[in-house]
Structure formats: C-alpha cells, structure tokens
Amino acid sequence: QTVVTQEPSFSVSPGGTVTLTCGLSSGSVSTSYYPSWYQQTPGQAPRTLIYTTNTRSSGVPDRFSGSILGNKAALTITGAQADDESDYYCVLYVGSGIWVFGGGTKLTVL
Amino acid sequence: QVQLVESGGGVVQPGRSPRLSCAVSGFTFSNYAMHWVRQAPDKGLEWVAVIWYDGSNKYYADSVKGRFTISRDNSNNTLYLQMNSLRVEDTAVYYCARGVGATTRGSFDIWGQGTMVTVSS
C-alpha cells in the first residue's frame, strides 16, 4: 500500500519562505506522479494551488510554486502572509487510476 | 462561471444505499474526468473514485471498491456516487472535483462545496 508523506506541521514567519514536501514511503516522486497541492481552511472546501507538478491554478498568486526537490514534490511559499495559515495537502497519482493524498501539513504563520 | 454543486447527503443508517449527485455548470462536462474525494470529521482528504470523460473507465480507492459506484450523465451534466453497504467509517464530507483533463492522469482543479454524509443508527 502506497503511503504519501507530508510534514505534520510547519511554521513560518510573516514575509518568510517555506517549502513543504510530499514524498513516498518507498521510492521517489517524479513528474510521472502528477503531484498537486491544495490549501484548506477549517470548514471550507479545498482550494487548488498547483497541479501537475508546477502549474499554478487560476487566480493563485505567484508566491506559490511547485517543483520536484530531490526525491520529493515540493510546494514553496514565498513572502508568507497571515492568511496562508492553513492545511496543505498533496496528492500523487500512483498508477492504475489511483490517487493518494498525503496526511496534510498544518502551516502556522507567526 | 464554473460551478459544482453536490447533493444527497444527510444522516443514513448503516447498510443503507444513498446516492450523491454533483450538478455542474460553466464548462463542457463531457470533456473532463470527474472525481469524488471525501474528508472524515477532523481528518485529511481521501480520494474515493474517478470516472473518465466518457464513462468508459472508473477507478476506486480500496476502501470503497465493491461498495461504491461512480457514474455520470453527460446529457444532464451530472456526476453520481452510488454508495452501498454504508459503514460508520464512511461518515465524511463528500466533494466532487473536476479532473485536469479527460482521463486519470491529471489531478483535480475545481471543487464543489461538499455534502455531508453521516452514517449512524
């Protein structure tokens, strides 16, 4: 069974830069996994930030960027703002039509 | 504008078989794969199922395979999730989401607001 790993929590200072990662319990993430990133605040539907590794969804500011860093997918937020404080989820295509979400990262801006 | 509106949620007894619907507008429904994603209370997101643009292929998470069926009606711009043999652990907000592209190899970009399904006796 494929497990997608994310940092449970992360903290960043206002104006700072943070990189969240998305890995596999076994193996390396590549563009073939079509990594995507979603932001969610409590009580709200997820919002798409990045899909297919590095394509920014419509209306998403360019402070958010996606990439592959080493053996993981990465979401980098530059110039963090207070309203970036949210849960962030990645999802990977693991083959045979199946997608698997990571457990999410709770980002604190302070 | 692009809109996805889920319906059909509520409180249901274990073992019952409700059907969720997702009515879409603002884009050509028949050009896109569609997904269901769920989120149990205070838990993370869980991918549930995907259906290709023409309904020819469907894939499911192991947790629902054999119990849930995803389908679509392209003439009425509606996505469905038939949920059979419901369990308490199926309690969640169910979101429909538009795929990035027509088949499986693109994640999801547009989300509905979700419909809550509570399985309880």
Image: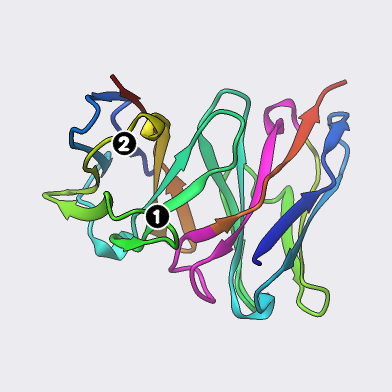
Which structural element holds mark 2?
A: strand
In depth, the one of A95 and B79 nearer the eye is B79
Residue segment shown in magenta:
B87-109
**Whole-percent x, y for residue A14 in the image:** 25, 28
In depth, the one of B47 and B31 nearer the eye is B31
Residue carrying label 1: A60
Residues under labels 1 and 2: Cα distance?
Answer: 24 Å
Height in image: B65 above or below A52? above
**Whole-percent x, y for residue B92 in the image:** 68, 33
Q: Nearer the viewer, mark 1 or mark 2?
A: 1
Dot 2: few (<14), some (14–19), or many (≥20) neighbours within 10 Å?
A: many
Which structural element holds mark 1?
A: loop
Residue carrying label 2: A5
Residue at 43 percent of width and 46 percent of height: A38
Residue at 71 percent of width and 30 percent of height: B91
Q: Hey, what amino acid is under mark 2?
A: Thr
**Whole-percent x, y for residue B53 in the image:** 62, 76
